[in-house]
Structure formats: C-alpha cells, structure tokens
Image: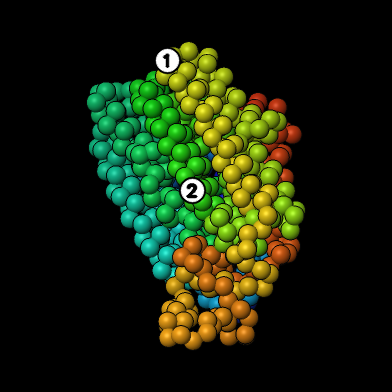
Amino acid sequence: MNALVPLPVLLPLFATGLSLAAGIRLKRFQRFISVAVLTAVVVISVVLMIAADDGPLSVHLGDFAPPLGITLVADRLSGLMLTVSSLVTLCVLVFSLGQGMADKDDETPLAVFHPAYLILVAGIACTFLAGDLMNLFVGFEIMLVSSFVLLTLGGTGPRIRAGSTYVIISLLSSMIFLVAIAITYAATGTVNFAQLAERFDDLSLGVTTLIQAMLLTVFGIKAAVFPVAAWLPDSYPTAPAPVTAVFAGLLTKVGVYCMLRTETLLFPGNRLGNLLLVVALASMIIGILGAVAQTDLKRLLSFTLISHIGYMVFGIGLADRAGIAGAIVYVVHHITVQTTLFLVAGLIERRGGTTELTRLGGMARSAPLLSLLFFVPAMNIAGIPPFSGFIGKLALMRAGIDNGSVLAWVLVGGSTLTSLLTLYVIVKVWNLAFWRSEPPGQAAEGTVMESQEDDTDDTDDDVADEGGPAVTPQDDQGIPVRPGGGQVVATSITGKAVTTTKRPPRTMLAATAATVVLGLSYTVLAGPLAAYTDRSAQELLTRTPYIEEVLRP
C-alpha cells in the first residue's frame, strides 16, 4: 500500500509530458489523458484515505532514510485533503473542457492549459504528502510556476497584471520560506518533519518562536489571511472561471493545511495561539465587510474567501482536539463550496455577459437551473442548517465555547456576526442577479462581449463626436458586439470575447452540478465525516504515529 503514496504526484507529471507531446494536433487525446489521469488520482486518493485510517503510510524515495531522502507521508489529514482536492480538480477540468469546446478555443494557449493544470495538481499533491520542509517548498514552487501560466492564459492586459502581482507576492513568501528553512537546518541539522518534531524540544524558545513566526507568515500569505490578503481580490477575478475556481477553492487551503501540519507536529503547546485568534477575527470581519462593499460577483466571492479562511484559523488557534477537528471539517466544506460558487459565477458571466451585479437580473425566471446551482452552495456557505457550512461553524463555535477564554468568546461572537453578514451578502447577490427584473442594459442572447482592451468604443465615439450616427459594433461575422463598459466581461479561457447564451453548455452545467452534489454529500455523510476528522485531529495532536512511521527502520 505504501507504493501508492507517490502516485498522486507522479501520475500528473507523467501525463504532463504526454499532454505536451500531443499538443493541439491531438486535442481529443490530450483531453482524454487529463481526465483519465485525474480520475485515477481520485481512486488512489480514496484508497490512501481509507488505508491511512489504520495508521500513516510513508515512502522514502530512492530508499534513502531521513534526512537525506525525499519522504512522502499519507496520514488521515493528507488522505482526506487529497481525496477532496482530486474530486474538485476533476470537476473543474470537466468544466474547462466544456468551456473550451463551447468557445471553440483550439489554439496554443488552450493546449498549454492541460499541461499547466496537471502540473498544478501535482504541486498540490506534493504539498499534502511532503514529509519535510524542503519538499513542501518544492510543492509551493511547482504550484507557483503553473499558477502563473494559468492566470495569464491569453496574454490579456488584466491577466498579465494580475499574474504579475501574484508572482511578486509568491516570490516574497518563497524568500521568507527559504530563510526559515535555512535557519531550521542550521539549528537542527534536518528539515524532516518527524526529526524536527523531536529536535525542536532541544532548541531555545527564541529560535523556535522565530521559525514558527516565519512559517506562519509564509503560510498566511498563501492562505490569504489578514493582513497579507490584499493581493487576492485583484488577482483571482481576472482569470478564466475554471482557473479562478480551483485557485479559490484549493490554493488558499494549501496554506491552511500547512498551518495545521506545522502547528500540531512541530510547534505543540500553542505559543502563538492568541495571535492566530486575533488574525482569525480580523480576517473574518474585514473580509466580510469588503464583500459587503462589492458589486462585482467575483470580487465579492474573493472577499468572502478571505473572511471564511478566518474560521479555519480560528480552529487552528484553539489548538485543541475539538478546534482542530472543526477546522478540518470547515476546510473540506469550503474547498468544495467556494469552488462551486466560482464555477457558478462563470456560468452567470456566460449567461449575462458580466459579473457586475448592477447589470444583471431576472435569472430566477430566465435560468432556473442556474439559479438552483447558485442557491444551494450560497446557502451552504452562509451556514444555513442543515448544510455542511452550518455543521463546520457549529463545531468551531462549540470548541470556542468549551475553550472558555475571553478571546475565544470574542471569536464566537465574531463568527456569528460574519455568518450573518455572509447571509446578507448572499441575499444581495440573489436579489440583484436573480430575483429582480431583468435590467434594460443586460446582454441579450447571442451578444458578443468585447474584451476590456478592445478599441471599438473609441471608433464609435469619434463617429458620434463628428455628428454622425452611432455605429453598433459588430464582430467579423456581423454579430452585434456589446461593449464591456469598463467592467469585467465574459471572456474565454484564452482571453477572447465570447457570445452570451441562455443555455450554458451541458458539460459545464454537469460539472457544476457535480460539485454541488459533492457539497451536499458532506451533509448526508456528516456523521462519518465528523468521526474521521476527530480521529485525524487526535492523530495530529498525538504526533507519535506520524513520527514512528517515518523514522522506523
């Protein structure tokens, strides 16, 4: 069974080579390879999750023992994260296939999408399975390289700017990470997690606190917690819908996972627990207030993402069994629901030509299926019973109440306020985009949404200024084109303008519906999920099973 541990990393990397070799000439083969490999990763992840319930699994690549070799470890937490992430990435891939086929995007940028996406999946799996700090850093860098490619597909101005911001912030965090690794190795002679768990006890409090603070800073940037979250709302909304969905759903949770792993395994005792609780409260309140102020759906969801990361940090800051278990439940819930909401935002963008809420309306009548696909995850993230969002929040609040400290009670109040404001934001979106009548300016079916960088408007303005009649812009096939008006408008994966449609492609609807069902399954399986996360929290806090598995002869 241990031989399966490296496969979630190796299979996507192997498929990347095949996908690059296929290119645009064998696009069907390229799609088949991507779907087949991610399906295989789902199956392997489920097997690892079930097997890890009996104890951690580990493999030393090249049979080199720590600290020389590369160690990959699958325990309950990493097995669960692998399973959820592989299911979500498979659904997002199917969504992207539907979008690409609908837009007839067959050029080189879309051909590059598949290899970059597979590398991203490999990087995510590497971070979940890494048994040492150095390979955790490698996983981060793999994700960084592929993320930049995916963010800048099509080479449009907004995407290049967003990608540049993302890379600069990521490189800054990478530099801090490398310094932290160097200090750790200089102080202990290893970067292996199991060995560090034993050797940190012999270091001075100042050294361990410095390393802990630096690692928390790195993972906080990756997770987008306040005050290092300002980059996220400007980076994610410009990307294609499937890219934004997988970034929002998964990449921020990689940072949360790293916090869970290091805070429990390397830094027991909760020395910086109060700081984490303050950060959690600030992330909740400031994030949700930012969402309240937004009128663009993607930016609004980006701010709710920052806000709800605070719930997970809340559980980590409590650092007890109930808090850690609640944080894991909320991570699993949020990966799926946040991904679903961004996929739905992509469908709304295709239906209405924009995600600007002031220019949308009437979708409850004109697109009832789309309305349902939004309503279910929206109620879920708002924490309405009996959805998994309510279960996760209730678990965290109970853990805070059981903790009994003043700061924990403040967090319970902040969590309640954030949940109410999240419901307010969701109702706002529903009223503007779905419930009210369709506004006069909403794009009709068949309208081609020009990109933000088109110069058509300038030509029309010049004609109007000269006293001539206003010219309705058209594309090269004579179809009327609707200007973007300076807002984020619908674009394809490669950045080209798309034609609005009242009936989104079935593949995109099916993929979105699958993520909705996955989110609902957490409610149906709430008992087994809560029991599994409780055992996972106990294993994390005990530390002994992990250490013994990695260091055994």
- Can you tell which mark lies on residue 406? 1
Q: Is residue 273 visible?
A: yes
Q: Residue at x 54, y 35 (%)?
A: 421
Left or right side of 379 for 550 = left
Find residue 186 and report its horizontal and vertical position in percent.
24, 37
Mark 2 or mark 1: whose residue is earlier in sequence: 2
- Can you tell which mark lies on residue 12? none
Amino acid, disc 2:
Gln
Q: Residue at x 31, y 37 (%)?
A: 214
Q: Residues within 10 Å of mark 1 (few under 14, many from 20)?
A: few
- Residue 322 vs 68, above or below: the answer is above
Amino acid, disc 1:
Val
Please say if the residues under marks 2 and 1 sit with CB atoms less than 8 Å apart.
no
Task: Using the image as rendered, state which of residue 46 and residue 334 is in the foreground.
Answer: 334
- Residue 222 vs 491, above or below: the answer is above
- Can you tell which mark lies on residue 294? 2
- Give the color scheme: rainbow, by chain, secondary structure or one colour: rainbow
Q: Residue at x 72, y 45 (%)?
A: 517
Q: How far apart in space, not on screen, are marks 2 and 1 (Cα)?
A: 32 Å
Q: Is residue 49 visible?
A: no
Judging from the image, what secondary structure is the residue with disc 2 in?
A: loop
Observer-side mark, 2 or 1, equals 2
Q: Residues within 10 Å of mark 2 (few under 14, many from 20)?
A: some
Task: Using the image as rendered, state which of residue 413 and residue 392 is in the foreground.
Answer: 413
Find residue 543 and report its horizontal and vertical position in percent.
48, 25
Task: Using the image as rendered, state which of residue 316 and residue 480 is in the foreground.
Answer: 480
Judging from the image, what secondary structure is the residue with disc 1 in?
A: helix
How many marks overall?
Answer: 2
Task: Using the image as rendered, state which of residue 375 and residue 135 is in the foreground.
Answer: 375
Q: Residue at x 29, y 40 (%)?
A: 180
